[in-house]
Image (cartoon, rainbow, N blue to C red):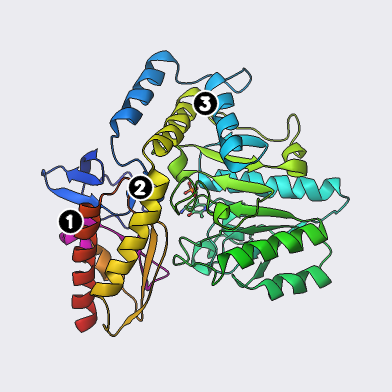
Amino acid sequence: MSEHLMNTYARQPVTFVKGEGVWLWDDKGERYLDALAGVAVNGLGHSHPKFVAALGAQVSKLIHVSNNYQIAEQSQLADKLCEIAGMDRVFFCNSGCEANEASIKLARLYGHQKGIEAPEIIVMDKAFHGRTLATLSATGNRKTQAGFEPLVSGFVRVPFDDLEAVRQVAEHNHNVVAVLVEPVQGEGGVNIPHDAKAYLQGLREICDANGWLLMLDEVQSGIGRTGAWFSFQHTGITPDVMSLAKGLGSGVPIGACVAKGKAADVFTYGKHGSTFGGNPLASAAGLATLKIIEEEGLRDNADILGNWINKEFAKQLAGIAGVVVIRNAGLMIGIELDRSCGELVKKALESKVLINVTADTVVRLLPPLVISQAEAQHLVDTIAALIKDFLAK
Ligand code: PMP
């Protein structure tokens, strides 16, 4: 690895040179099952032929023009996103943290428009929203924040999955303008509310009663991963604002802040912008991604195989001391152990499977949405055996 790269990542000693479906090949010709999909980026799998063709066609036609002009592909993607989300307007950027930055700026503007001088946003313990200054301040993990003080102010933190705590803030704090929450916490450990429907419906009611915006970070849980286009669609509510990135571009950087109703009119001319946001190439990547997910029934595959993988792990790990719980929302899968298990990442790599560990004790799997039953079986067999070995030590 070049010494000219800043030292921000604990990189594994492997260089990938080729991908196809759920498989990656390293520079020595060894094949690996990618059960991380670039951390939920690659739902279509690597080098999906229809995606490669769509991208190639766009590259030959037009890669970039400034947002000072009309961009047909961007308009089409905005229309499609609003159609499938039941929302009204989109601002395009390049990543998840930028999508959340846009949501946070939108909430503050909304507050000021209502006459609140120092608007505050409710955020959750164990949340992850990105690493720009505002989004790391919203993130509920001291490790992400440490050393970057002074943090951005204007966030009120409450425990995840606790409606009473939000109600209490509503009673005492009249500067609150919005709630920002991941419907399923990804980096925090694949945390699923104990009753996701009741939790989001409860948040929706509190927001409506207080005139707050409900803002969902679907950067990791969106674009088919949980078995619906967006995870809120399992709950019967619609948010005012939603941030997207990761899976939307299948590896081409794109982010989106999607808004509905009164929230859709908050940003006005000159209030926000991005050089690359929603350029023709990124927008074509988004359009192709959504089309392929639809054509190939990948939301159903995420639902069916996610639940199957969970059950298979439950079978293979039954009665093993040290396994706390196995949970999944579609193909967001977490296996929580009773101890720190970071070393499993390296062990899995040696077994030619890519995984990661979040919140220190949770093995996290985010395979591409195209994963087949046979590939899922290989994944479970390999990882369950590693977990058993690890816990038997
Ligand atoms: N929000 C969530 C829920 C995420 O999981 C992530 C990335 N792990 C981000 C925001 C930040 O996305 P990006 O790295 O594209 O800025």
Q: Is residue 247 magenta?
A: no
Give x and y (percent) for residue 143: 49, 67
The residue under label 3 is which amino acid type? Asn
The residue under label 2 is which amino acid type? Leu
Image quadrant in which you'd find residue 61: top left
Q: Mark number for residue 279?
A: 3
State which tag comes first along the sequence, 2 or 1: 1
Note whether residue 13 is visible: no
Q: Mark number for residue 352?
A: 1
- Cα distance in 3D space between marks 2 and 1: 19 Å
On the rendered structure, is 302 left or right of 385?
A: right
The residue under label 1 is which amino acid type? Lys
Question: Residue 160 versus residue 85: which sits nearer the camera?
Answer: 85
Q: Mark number for residue 369?
A: 2
Give x and y (percent) for residue 30: 12, 47
Mark 3 secondary-structure assignment: loop
